Image (cartoon, grey):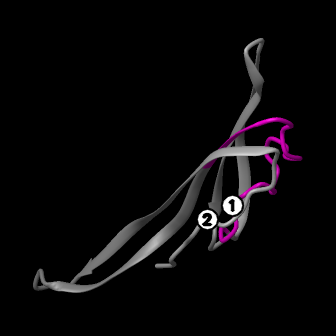
Amino acid sequence: MSTFGITKITGDLIESVDLTLSAETKELIKSDGTHSTARNVDTSFAFSVKGKGDLPAITLGGSTGAPTGVSGKVIITKITESQTNEDWQGWSYDGVAYPEA
C-alpha cells in the first residue's frame, strides 16, 4: 500500500484538505481452511478541498484538482460555491482518484 502526504493545492485561501485512502482486501483460503494469501484490490483515494476566494479551475467530472501525491484516474464528483454578506466567497469540491486505473 502506498504512503501519501498533502503538499499543495492552488487557490486563494485553502481552509482544509481531507484525504482518505481505501482498498478492499481479498483473502484466499486454502482447502483446509488456513490462510493462503491476501492482497488489496480496488484502491482509491477520496478527497475533499475547502477554501475561500475564487474557485480553482475545476469542472464537475473533470480530472484536475486532486491533492499532490494522488495519481491515476481522477474524477471531481461535487462542486459547491457559497456567498454571504459577512464573509468571503466560499467553495468546496470532492473527488475520487483510482491509482490503478
Q: Quadrant of the C terminus?
A: bottom right
Is 89 above or below relative to 29? above
* 61 inside magenta stretch: yes
- Going 74% across and 29% down the picture, which residue do you hit? 90
Task: Give, as a three-letter code, the residue at label 2.
Answer: Ile
Q: Where's residue 24, x and y in %?
A: 41, 65
* Of pointers 2 and 1, the one earlier in the residue sequence: 2
CB under 8 Å between discs 2 and 1: yes
Label 1 crowding class (10 Å Cα cut-off): few <14, some 14-19, many 20+? some
Provide the residue designation for mark 1: 67
Residue 79 at least partly seen: no
Q: Where's residue 28, x and y in %?
A: 28, 80
In this view, the residue in front, 20 or 44, is 20
Is 88 above or below relative to 24? above
Q: Quadrant for residue 86, please give it.
A: top right
Q: Which mark is residue 6?
A: 2
Task: Give, as a three-letter code, the residue at label 1.
Answer: Pro
Q: Which residues are magenta?
A: 48-70
Give the prevailing secondary structure in the magenta stretch.
Answer: loop
